[in-house]
Image (spheres, coloured by chain):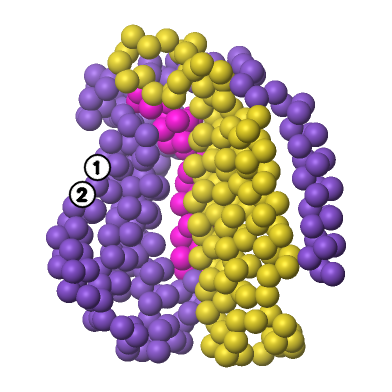
Amino acid sequence: MIYYLASISLILIGTYAILTKKNLIKIVLGLSMIESGVNILLVSIGYVHGKTAPIFSNLSMKASQMVDPVPQALVLTAIVIGLAVTAMALGIVIRLYDHHKTLNIDRIRQLKW
Amino acid sequence: MRKLLSILALAVIGYYLFVAMQAVPFGKDRMNPKVAKTYLEDGVKKTGSVNIVTAIVVNYRGFDTLGEVTVLFLAATGLGALLYDKRGKRHPRTPASPVVQIGAKILFPLIVLLGAYVFVHGHLTPGGGFPGGVIIATGFLLMYMAYRSYDVSHTALTVTESLAGLTFVIIGLLGLIYGRSFLNNFLPFGIPNTVFSAGVIPLIYIAIGLKVGSELTGVIDNMMETIR
C-alpha cells in the first residue's frame, strides 16, 4: 500500500510542478517525475507477497515462487519512451531559450516565432 | 490563487486515484494463468533464457521491442533535426579540474566495460540492451564534461547506429527464412544459465545495446554543440 501512496504522490507532485512553476526547466522536470511515478505504479501492481524476481538463478527454482513478469517487461518499454519524450522536450526548451532569451514562461507570450 | 486552485484539483484527483487503487489489492496473486504462468513455467524450455523478463521482451513480445527501437530512433533523429543549424564550435564555460580530467580518463574504459557486460548478459542477469546502452552513453557524457574539446566523430556514431538497427531487422528476416515467422529463433538453445545460450536473444540484445549507446551519445553531442 505504501508503494501505491508513494507513486501517486510522485504523479501529483509532478503535475503540481507543471501547473504552477514558471521556469521551463522545472516544467520539464515535473514531466519526468510523472513518468517515474507511473512506472513505479505499474511495477508495484505486479508484486506478489513473499515471491522473488523472475530469474531462474539456479534451475531448481520453481515457477510458483516468482512475481508477475509481464508488467516488468512493459515498464522496460515505458522507461525508454519517457527518456525519448524528455529529450525532445529539452530540445524544444533549448530552441525557445535561444529565440526569446529567457526561460520564464510569463515572458514568452506570443505563439509564433 | 493559481497554486491554491491547483492544490485543490490535485487533492481531488489524488483522492479518487487512491480510491481506485483500493480495487487492486497490493500483493495478492493475480497472475493470469494463461499468460503469466505459462511464461514462467515454459519460459526456459521454449526460449532458453533463464531471465523471464528478457524472454518476454525479446522473444514472446519481440515485435514490440522492434517498435520501441524505432521510437527511440525517431526521437534521436527529431532532436537532431530540431537542433540542426546550431552546429558550430563548442565552448564550454569552465574547464574541469585536473582531478576530474584524470579520473575521467581512468574511468571511461571501465564504464564502457560495465555497459557491455550488462547487455551481453541480458539473458542471465537483470538489465539487458537498454540499460547497457545508457551506461555506455554516460561514459561518453563523463568525457564530454571533463574535456573542453572532446569530440566523437558523427560518422562513426551514425554508422554504428545504422548497422546495429539493420542487424536487428536482419535477424528477424533470417528468422522468417529459416524458421516459421518474423523474429523466430533459428539458433540452438544451448545449456541454460551459460553465456552462449538462449539462441538469438544475446545477439539481439548486443545490437540493441550498441544502438542505444551510440544514439544517446549522438543526442548528448547535439545538445553540447548548442553551447555558445
Whether residue A36 is visible to the viewer of this picture, yes or no, is yes
Q: Which chain is represented by yellow in the image?
A: A
In the picture, one chain is purple; tell me its letter.
B
The answer to whether A63 appears left or right of B171 in the picture is right
Residue at x 70% of width, y 23% of height: B25
Give the residue at x 76% y 28%.
Answer: B22
Q: Amino acid at mark 1?
A: Tyr
Mark 1 surroundings: few (<14), some (14-19) or many (≥20) residues within 10 A = some
Task: Give the percent coordinates (x, y) of residue A107.
Answer: 70, 87
Q: Residues at badges 2 and 1 in contact (C-beta under 8 Å)?
A: yes
Please say if B47 is above or below A101: above
Of residue B162 and residue B28, the one placed in the foreground of this image is: B28
In percent of width and height, residue A17 lies at 67, 63
Residue drawn at (44%, 24%), measured in percent from left and top? Answer: A53
| Label 1 SS | helix
Q: Residues within 10 Å of mark 2 (few under 14, many from 20)?
A: some
Say left or right for A73 vs B143: right
Labels 2 and 1 within one chain: yes
Quadrant (top left/top right/bottom left/bottom right) for the N terminus of chain B: bottom right
Which residue was labeled with disc 2?
B113
Region rendered in magenta: B49-78
Determine the chain carrying the residue at label 1: B
The residue lying toward the viewer, choosing from B59 and A95, is: A95
Q: Secondary structure at mark 2?
A: helix
Q: Quadrant of residue B128?
A: top left
- Can you identify the residue that label 1 sits on? B117
* Residue B56 vertical placement versus B78 (above, below): above
Residue under the point 46% across and 74% down? B80
Q: Is residue B57 left or right of residue B30?
A: left
Dominant secondary structure, magenta: helix
